[in-house]
């Protein structure tokens, strides 16, 4: 039996690690949907600060507060929430594969009390490796770093390793817990002959990107990641979901649930707004040339300047060329999302970051006739 809803809805946010700015994005979109913080909704945040073992106790706190919906950020948080309750609706995001993780029965028919936004682990990581193979001469071995206690990160690394084998690239795995593990892991990677690094950058790894990128720079190892934070901070490039857009989509799920829609009736979306970010300064420092096949000219890659291609709405336009066969067909994996009005407040990177070149999707819904893998989707 579902618990009785309070007069003012109470939203619980459970995260392995909260990244600055993204929680504000969620609140901003909720406000746009009519849920103003403190008036139309009250948000309770529980942050594990990178320690997954703290998540069960934190979700227990949220349940004692009788929250109406839980937003679970990352696979460990989603699993902790699922294990704690079968009654309170759970909206997931930043989850690699909710079906394999045991969170939902299928994307189209999630069942039970879990739904939300996922991404494509077998495509995004593989595209990063293929891009590396076009930039790093004779790439044969890559060191894969990931948070050892995140099953979602392990899933991404496993799928990426499987797809990379098709390119003749071998993976060396290095699960880590904290920055104290980095020096020994990088030493082992060097002994293994790693020519580049792939990092599965969940919230905890993203928080530790400073010391990580310092060591990779000392060893002249190019770094490929899923999310843009690593690339903007000194990695070589990133290919993955636009997290700002993901958090806004999660807000739409929350709104639908608060209006009475059951999570089992809301298909899980796959992230459809992706960015390919290249750090031009890092490419130059590593002596690497970004080929035109990746969508950038020699001037942009070698000059250390920011080169951006934007459409008429101010959003980055999709000009990344497909990398090889079977990967990123449909240009930048852009799909149409019925009922979504687009990211109305596109934000540029904060000042002081490394110069980057971007190629990302055009405005959501701009290209008619493109559909998501799930026919239905929640809309505001």
Image (spheres, rainbow, N blue to C red):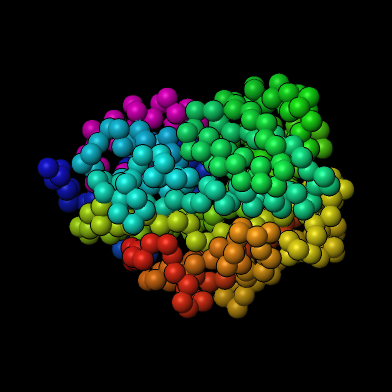
Q: Residue at x 34, y 50 (%)?
A: 106
Q: Quadrant of residue 347?
A: bottom right
Asked whether the viewer can see residue 15, the reply is no
For the N terminus, the quadrant is top left
* Residue 155, placed above or below residue 252: above
In the rendered structure, the answer to whether residue 33 lies left or right of residue 275 reads: left
| Count of marks overlaid on the render | 0
Asked whether the viewer can see residue 99, the reply is yes
Q: Position of residue 16 (x, y in %)?
A: 46, 35
Q: Nearer the viewer, residue 366 or 251?
A: 366
Q: Residue at x 73, y 48 (%)?
A: 132
In the rendered structure, the answer to whether residue 53 lies left or right of residue 69 reads: right
Can residue 180 be found in the magenta stretch? no
Q: Residue at x 85, y 59 (%)?
A: 303
In the rendered structure, the answer to whether residue 344 lies left or right of residue 4 reads: right
For the C terminus, the quadrant is bottom left
Q: Position of residue 31 (x, y in %)?
A: 36, 60
* Residue 305, placed above or below residue 75: below
Q: Residue at x 60, y 72 (%)?
A: 314
Q: Quadrant of residue 250?
A: bottom left
| Magenta span of residues | 48-72
Q: Position of residue 315 (x, y in %)?
A: 59, 69
* Residue 372, placed above or below residue 204: below
């Amino acid at each position: 039996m579902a618990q009785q809803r309070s007069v003012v809805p109470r939203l619980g946010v459970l995260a392995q690690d909260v990244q600055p700015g993204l929680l504000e994005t969620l609140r901003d979109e909720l406000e746009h949907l009519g849920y103003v913080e403190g008036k139309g909704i009250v948000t309770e945040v529980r942050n594990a600060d990178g320690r997954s073992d703290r998540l069960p106790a934190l979700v227990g706190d949220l349940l004692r507060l009788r929250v109406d919906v839980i937003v679970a950020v990352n696979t460990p948080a989603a699993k902790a929430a699922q294990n704690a309750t079968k009654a309170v609706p759970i909206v997931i995001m930043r989850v690699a594969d909710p079906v394999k993780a045991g969170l939902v029965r299928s994307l189209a028919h999630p069942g039970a009390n879990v739904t939300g936004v996922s991404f494509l682990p077998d495509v995004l990581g593989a595209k990063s490796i293929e891009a590396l193979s076009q930039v790093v001469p004779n790439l044969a071995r890559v060191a894969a770093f990931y948070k050892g206690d995140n099953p979602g990160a392990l899933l991404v690394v496993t799928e990426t390793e499987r797809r990379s084998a098709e390119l003749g690239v071998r993976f060396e795995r290095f699960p880590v817990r904290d920055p104290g593990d980095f020096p020994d892991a990088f030493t082992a990677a060097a002994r293994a002959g790693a020519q580049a690094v792939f990092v599965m950058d969940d919230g905890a790894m993203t928080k530790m990107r400073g010391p990580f990128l310092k060591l990779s720079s000392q060893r002249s190892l190019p770094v490929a990641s899923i999310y843009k934070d690593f690339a903007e901070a000194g990695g070589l490039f990133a290919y993955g979901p636009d997290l700002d857009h993901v958090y806004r989509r999660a807000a739409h799920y929350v709104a639908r649930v608060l209006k009475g829609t059951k999570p089992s009736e809301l298909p899980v979306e796959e992230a459809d707004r992706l960015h390919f970010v290249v750090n031009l300064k890092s490419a130059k420092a590593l002596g690497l040339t970004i080929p035109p096949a990746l969508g950038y000219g020699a001037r942009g890659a070698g000059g250390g300047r920011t080169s951006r291609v934007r459409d008429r709405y101010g959003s980055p336009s999709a000009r990344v060329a497909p990398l090889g066969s079977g990967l990123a067909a449909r240009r930048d994996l852009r799909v149409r999302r019925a009922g979504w009005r687009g990211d109305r407040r596109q934000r540029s990177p904060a000042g002081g970051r490394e110069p980057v070149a971007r190629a990302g999707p055009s405005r959501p819904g701009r290209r008619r006739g493109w559909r998501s893998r799930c026919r239905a989707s929640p809309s505001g």
